[in-house]
Amino acid sequence: MKRGVAATQWRATQKPAYRGLFRTSARDSWVVFAALLQSAALVLTFWGATFWGSGFAAMVLPVVAFGTWWGANTVSHIHLHLPIFGSRKLNQLFFWWLTLSLAIPQTLWKRRHFWHHAGEPAHKRPGWDRDSLVEASVIVGLWAILAWFSPTVFFVAYLPGYLVALGLCQLQGYHEHNALGITYPDGISTYNKLHNWLWFNDGYHAEHHRWPTEHWTQLPRRRHEMEEHRTSRFSPMLRFLERMQGPVWPARILSWLEKVALEIKPVQSFLVRRHTEAFARVVRTIEGFDPQGILIVGGGLFPRSVLVVSALWPQAHIQVLDQDADHIVRAKQYLTERGMDLTHVVFRQDTFEPELPTAADLVILPLAYVGERKPLYVPRNDGAVTLIHDWWHTRRGDVSTPITIWVWKRLTLVLPAEKPFT
């Protein structure tokens, strides 16, 4: 579902029933308490740095950086989507409290955030309106007082910490929608319990985009109502670790060797021939196996698996999944130059999630797979046979056969959980 569709839902949602002090849930008391803690930490460290010296001064920058970044993405984010209090006056007071404690004009933040939910249309990017300018003027006035009161603390600790916070906010927003170089407009969710406890369920990001006015306490219930969506085991600011899972450096070396092979035609012919022989030996062990749909993961740079399966099963529909757009371009060019008909071959830039079902009868995985390899050897529940390129010395799966010792590779077959084959 597109973000623009989801963005219309918060406009149409009815006002929740009044429940005393808090508009929606008494658990919002924790949100308010967290906001007060952030403000108290800021005042205490700034005051302490001014009157009690360098020990407190060293704390100002991290307190401002973390507090502003965290507060903008939790308390402020919750309040702009679903005002916390039942009283309009209390909501306005809390609105101004956040504006001053975070030094972020809440009107501008709200308008920019709803624009984000609407799909970020370039021609409708919100600018500074009157209310935003008034709030910014008040912030500048407060800053002038702080700078006069303690110029060293303000310019050396507070202001750099504030700029770091803005950078962290930008990074978090990026990683909530991007992973491994791929953009996911509807968001990426993480179900890490510690993260969602500290960030008031902000990890349910795809769910939030699907139901923008759902109260933060209710988002976990929406998890199982979601269509297929991207998830990550890492919090947004740790999502770079996805690139470090599995054999990253071996994968890069193997990719470099693939590029070398593309420059030497005899090597290409040798590799395609040996892979075809290995594939044929393995599939002969499955009586009557005739896949109609084949998923090739990471087969974009040197598409020999496409050549092999096209020769073995000419009528099969082939889908190639590669996270590198340049690899896909090279593969298409390589196959076209060899006169191959690509009407039955589809290339898609994406990552492979082993636990998600596929519509394929055969899934082929590369030696250069970046990620945890152990799940690849688990029999699939979607009925697909798995063929895995392995190192020569590795013997796993139901059937294993050498490809060639010259590239130190073998082919491993893993039958599905329900084996319809003999």
Image (cartoon, rainbow, N blue to C red):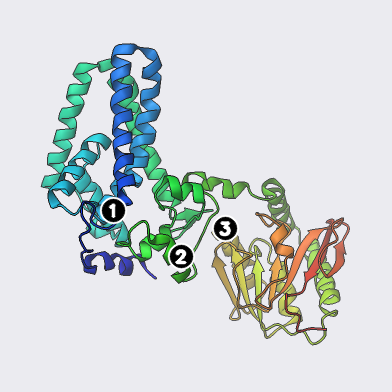
**Is 59 drawn above or below residue 52 in the view shown?**
below
Disc nearer the start of the sequence (1/2): 1
Look at 85% across and 80% down and name the residue there. 284
Task: Say what secondary structure mark 3 lies in.
Answer: loop
Residue type, label 1: His
Q: Quadrant of the N terminus?
A: bottom left
First in sequence: mark 3 or mark 1?
A: 1
Of the two numbered discs 2 and 3 in the rendering, the one whose residue sits closer to the viewer:
2
**Circle 1 — which element?**
helix
- Determine if residue 408 is in view: yes
Where is mark 1, residue-wise? 113
- Locate residue 326 relative to residue 129 in the image: left or right: right
Q: Where residue 333 appears, x then y in whole percent?
A: 60, 67
Badge 1 crowding class, 10 Å Cα cut-off, few under 14, some 14 to 19, many 20 or more, is some
Query: 302 or 320: which is nearer to us?
Result: 320
Q: Which residue is mark 3?
A: 324
Left or right of residue 235: residue 363 = right
Inspect the image, locate mark 3, and give the three-letter code of the amino acid beneath it.
Asp
Image location of residue 176, percent across then percent down: 43, 53
Nearer the observer, disc 3 or disc 1? 1
Task: Please give the residue where the numbered disc 2 appears in the rendered image.
Answer: 223
Residue in the picture at 21% in, 42% down: 105
Q: Nearer the viewer, residue 110 or 295?
A: 110
**Label 3 environment density (alpha carbons within 10 Å; few <14, some 14–19, many ≥20):** some
Q: Nearer the viewer, residue 355 or 407?
A: 355
Task: Please give left or right for residue 82 compared with residue 136 in the image.
Answer: right
Q: Are marks 1 and 2 in contact (CB under 8 Å)?
A: no
- Name the image quarter holding residue 345: bottom right
